[in-house]
Image (tube, coloured by chain):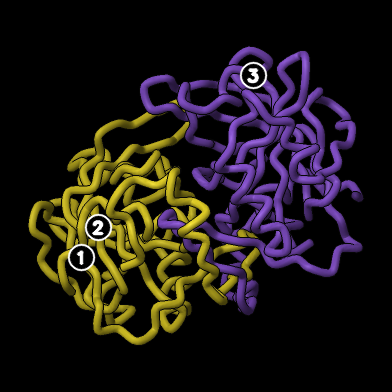
Chain colours: A purple, B yellow
Amino acid sequence: MQPLDLGKAFTLIEPGPVILVTTHDGQKANIMTLSWTMVMDFTPRFAITTGEWNYSFTALRKHRECVIAIPTVDLLDKVVGIGTCSGADIDKFSRFALTPMPAQYVRAPLINECLANIECKVIDIIERHNILVLEGLAAHFDTAREEKRTIHAVGDGTFIVDGQTLDRREMMAAKLPPGIQAH
Amino acid sequence: MQPLDLGKAFTLIEPGPVILVTTHDGQKANIMTLSWTMVMDFTPRFAITTGEWNYSFTALRKHRECVIAIPTVDLLDKVVGIGTCSGADIDKFSRFALTPMPAQYVRAPLINECLANIECKVIDIIERHNILVLEGLAAHFDTAREEKRTIHAVGDGTFIVDGQTLDRREMMAAKLPPGIQAH
C-alpha cells in the first residue's frame, strides 16, 4: 500500500463505488459496507449517510475517526456479507478473512486487501439528515494490485462493475484543479 | 418517458452516475452537470454539493426546485460540454440540442433525451458545507431506450462507463425495503 497524494483522494469516491468503513470503538475494530457517499468539491472532504440503526455509528460518533477502504469486484461477496451482518456479535475481519493494518493517524485499521484506504476524521455530524462529514488525513493506494474495477450498488441487490474508461481530460482541463491525474 | 415508482428513484442515484440538473430562474431554463451526489437512506431524498460558484445555485436557492436527469454514455460529450460552460451567457438546451419537456410539479424541465428524470424540491440548504438536500416528487424513466449505461466521473477528466451487472438480490433480501427491484 503506497502513499497517495491526499489531493487525489476524492477521485476514489467521486465515481460512486461501494466503500467499506472501518472503525475502532476502543475495544475492537469493525467494518461496515456503505454506498451512501458524496464528494464535497475537489477536496479530501466526504459526506456519508448513516445513523443510529448502524452499529458502527456509535464508534463514529464517540471516536470521530474511521478509514474508508475501496474494495474491488473480486471482493464483492465479502462486501455484501459485511453489509448483511452486525459487528455487535461478529468479528468481521476474522469472519471475512480481511487483514487489518495499522493506520498512521487513526486507530481504525486499513484493510490490506482493498485497492485503497483513506484515513479520516469526522469533522461534523448533521443529525437532522444523518449526514457525517469526514476529512481525509492520509491516503494509501495499492499500485501493485491487478484488479482495479470497483463496484457500484444499485440499491436493489444488484451491482454494476466498472466498465471501460473514457478520457475527456482535454475538454475538462480548465475545470479541474492543477495536478489532478489518474492514479 | 414512463412514470417510475418514486420509491425506486434512489436506485438511479446510488450507483453514482454523473447527473444533469435542470433549473428555471423564472425567465429561462438552465442545465448543470454534477457528480457530487448522495443517496440518503432508501428514500427519494438526495444530497448534492454545490454553491455560489455555480450559476444554477441562485435559481436553486430562490425557487427551491430542480429536475435531476440521468444521462447515458452516448450523451457524454454533451454532459462534459454542459459542465464546462455557463448558463449565464448560453442557452444550454439550444447549444447542446436537448429537448426540455414540461414536468408535473416543478417549473424546471425534464430532459427528453435522458434515461430518467426526477422532479425535486430543495428541502434544506446546509450553507456551511454547500450541501443541498432534495426530495423527489415524481420520477420518469424511458423504458424504450436501448442505451442504459450511465457514466461515472473520476474527477480527473476521465469517466468510467457501466460494465456488467452482478446479482446479489438473494444475499441482500433481508436488508432491502420491500418491492425494490431493478427497473
For residue B180, say whether it is visible.
yes
Q: What is the secondary structure assignment of the residue under circle 3?
A: helix
Badge 2 element: strand
| Viewer can see residue B88 | no
Q: Is residue B162 above or below residue B57?
A: below
> Which amino acid, by three-letter code, is at mark 2?
Ile
Q: Which residue position is annotated with label 1?
A: B140
The chain to which mark 3 is attached is: A
Q: Residue at x 85, y 46 (%)?
A: A112
The disc label shown at residue B118, or none: 2
Q: Chain of mark 1?
A: B
Which sits in the foreground, B81 or B183?
A: B183
Asked if the residue at tag 1 contacts the one at tag 2, i.e. Cβ–Cβ closer than 8 Å, the answer is yes
- For label 1, the crowd category at 10 Å Cα-Cα, with few meaning under 14, some 14 to 19 and many 20 or more, is many
* Quarter occupied by residue A67: top right
Q: The disc labelled 3 sits on which kind of residue?
A: Ala
Q: Is residue B50 above or below residue A59?
A: below
Q: Residue at x 81, y 38 (%)?
A: A110
| Mark 1 residue type | His
Place of residue B120 in the rendered image (x, y in percent of width and height, measured from the top left): 22, 49
Separation of residues labelled 2 and 1 (CA atoms): 6 Å
Which mark, by number, is residue A96? none
For label 3, the residue is A59
Q: Are marks 2 and 1 on the same chain?
A: yes
Q: Relative to B78, is A88 on the left or the right? A: right
Q: Label 3 to label 2, Cα distance in Å?
A: 35 Å
**Residue at the spot x=59%, y=55% of the render?**
A17
